[in-house]
């Protein structure tokens, strides 16, 4: 049997980063030991793995998040209880590198201003000779500026994937270590000796940090306690059923747009593969016609038909991609912006309730300096009530604007994609061309196989 000291330690880890940088590939390589062949964008996946590090047994709970873009809502699953973050970019994609900077800001904002255990990962290092755009130095410098660990990896080649988790576990264990006696510190390889570290300490900075951790911890503790008691039905909460119903409805709508984006992306993937296969098929008949004089006419006819079929699939794919980009804007910008305000309202409501209960407790059990304390608590309570009401007003305005705007935009997009789908499946090439042309009416040239009018 395990002694308490040897008990399995649970550590919760989240992978974050721009879409397509390899978060899922890293996770699957680490958890299941393989590299997935195809790209399936993630909504959110949870994984669990028992892992040994430095002689200790760990149970790692790993959250593989949906890729974050500029306006993505910070995943709720990552806002509580996470011990360490893995921030991934791809070394061949500058945008993904730029994005981890804003993801980092959000993580820090969400966790509070404590030093959160983190590792920055530059993935796809197997592409370094052909497509690298972020140098190792650039990645390392950024990580250093955050006091985070850094590593370059390839999920494809299985380069340094386990080391991501080793380094992050090291960061987590260091941050959890409150006992800084030499004996404890020396268990962590690579840590400076205590005497050396102490001589470099800026005490004013440490005092400030301790104070902010204290405030953050107490605030978080009170809010979490409030949520827990509400959940158990042991404490009352401020409710506004009509408002909450509207917010819940938007959350569901948001999820459904997410499903549309996901399904449309998968459809587009299949369509572009089909278009490529059809064009290849056509090309093979054309090549055959060059050598087979007697079959030339038949080969050319087949090649021509398949060429047109392939072009139609490409046309539909163009319409579909345009549709996807509009749906993505709705999903990750338009609705996400209102959702962020809704989450802020929920947080403000909890803070208000915490203060409301504190005030009620003070009023019910008078102590020394009671009237002074009650007046302070009542002022704080009123400030939080106003903040909560203000957020609610903001949400109401945003919900109204969002609804008008959303319905109008989506209705136009649905009309367009419906026309393109009907034209494609009825084999009406002319109608399909005109759908594509309409999309490019804003001045962008259509693809070469669509003649200009
Ligand atoms: N060359 C190379 N390709 C990789 C590597 N890791 C992932 N990929 C490819 O990059 C694409 C995206 O990989 P995913 O792991 O699905 O990316 P993700 O970050 O989870 O994407 P989202 O779930 O959409 O956010 C896939 O086509 C992978 O095959 C790698 O180390 N090297
Ligand atoms: Mg993924």
Image (cartoon, rainbow, N blue to C red):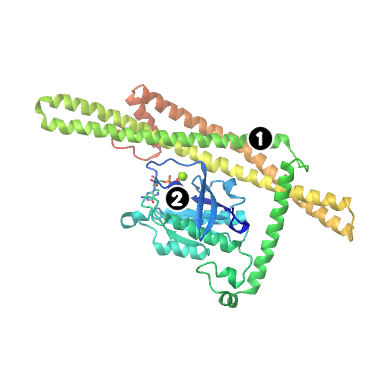
Q: Quadrant of residue 405?
A: top right
Between disc 1 and disc 2, whose residue precedes?
2
Q: Is residue 385 visible?
A: no
Quickly name the residue at label 1.
246
How far apart marks 1 and 2 lie (CA) works out to 41 Å
**Helix, strand or loop under label 1:** helix
Q: Secondary structure at mark 2?
A: helix
Residue 390 seen: yes
Which one is in front in this view, the residue at disc 1 or the one at disc 2?
A: 2
- Percent position of residue 142, x then y: 48, 62
Q: Residue at x 20, y 33 (%)?
A: 284
**Near-viewer residue (400 or 46):** 46
* Residue 368, position as x, y percentages in the image: 89, 60
In screen coordinates, is 131 left or right of 392?
left
Residue identified by numbered label 2: 30
Identity of the residue furthest to the front in this view: 1
Q: Nearer the viewer, residue 420 or 274?
A: 274
- Screen quadrant of the C terminus: top left
In the picture shown, does residue 134 fall above or below 267?
below
Vertical comparison of 251 with 193: above or below: above
Q: Residue 226: x and y, percent? A: 73, 48
- In the image, 105: left or right of 360? left
Mark 1 and ligand 1: say if the CB distance to the nearest ligand atom is below 8 Å. Answer: no
């Amino acid at each position: 049997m395990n002694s308490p000291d040897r008990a399995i330690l649970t550590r919760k880890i989240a992978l974050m980063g721009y879409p397509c940088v390899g978060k899922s590939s890293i996770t699957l390589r680490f958890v299941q030991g393989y590299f997935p062949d195809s790209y399936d964008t993630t909504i959110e996946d949870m994984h669990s793995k028992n892992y040994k590090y430095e002689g200790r047994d760990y149970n790692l709970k790993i959250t593989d998040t949906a890729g974050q873009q500029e306006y993505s809502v910070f995943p709720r699953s990552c806002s509580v209880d996470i011990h360490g973050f893995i921030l991934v970019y791809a070394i061949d994609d500058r945008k993904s590198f730029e994005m981890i900077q804003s993801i980092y800001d959000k993580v820090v904002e969400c966790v509070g201003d404590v030093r959160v255990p983190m590792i920055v990962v530059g993935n796809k290092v197997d592409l370094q000779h052909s497509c690298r755009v972020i140098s190792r130095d650039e990645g390392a410098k950024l990580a250093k500026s955050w006091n985070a660990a850094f590593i370059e990896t390839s999920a494809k080649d299985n380069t340094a994937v386990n080391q991501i988790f080793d380094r992050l576990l090291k960061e987590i264990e260091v941050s959890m270590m409150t006992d800084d006696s030499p004996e404890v510190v020396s268990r962590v390889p690579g840590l400076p000796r205590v005497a050396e570290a102490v001589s470099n300490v800026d005490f004013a900075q440490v005092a400030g940090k301790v104070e902010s951790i204290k405030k953050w911890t107490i605030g978080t503790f009170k809010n979490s306690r409030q949520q827990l008691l509400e959940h158990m039905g042991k404490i009352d909460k401020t409710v506004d059923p009509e408002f909450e119903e509207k917010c819940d409805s938007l959350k569901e709508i948001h999820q459904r747009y997410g499903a549309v984006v996901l399904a449309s992306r998968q459809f587009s993937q299949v369509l572009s593969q089909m278009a490529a296969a059809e064009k290849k098929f056509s090309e093979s008949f054309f090549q055959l016609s060059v050598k087979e004089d007697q079959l030339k006419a038949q080969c050319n006819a087949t090649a021509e038909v398949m060429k047109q079929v392939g072009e139609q699939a490409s046309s539909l794919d163009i319409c579909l991609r345009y549709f996807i980009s509009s749906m993505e804007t709705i999903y990750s910008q338009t609705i996400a912006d209102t959702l962020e305000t809704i989450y802020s309202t929920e947080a403000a409501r909890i803070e208000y309730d915490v203060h409301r209960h504190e005030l009620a407790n003070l009023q019910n059990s008078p102590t020394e300096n009671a009237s002074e304390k009650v007046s302070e608590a009542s002022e704080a309570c009123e400030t939080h009530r106003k903040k909560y009401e203000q957020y609610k007003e903001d949400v109401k305005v945003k919900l109204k604007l969002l609804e008008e705007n959303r319905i109008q935009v989506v209705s136009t997009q649905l009309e367009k994609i419906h026309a393109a789908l009907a034209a494609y499946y009825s084999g009406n090439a002319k109608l399909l061309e005109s759908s594509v042309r309409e999309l490019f009416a804003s001045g962008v040239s259509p693809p070469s196989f669509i003649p200009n009018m």
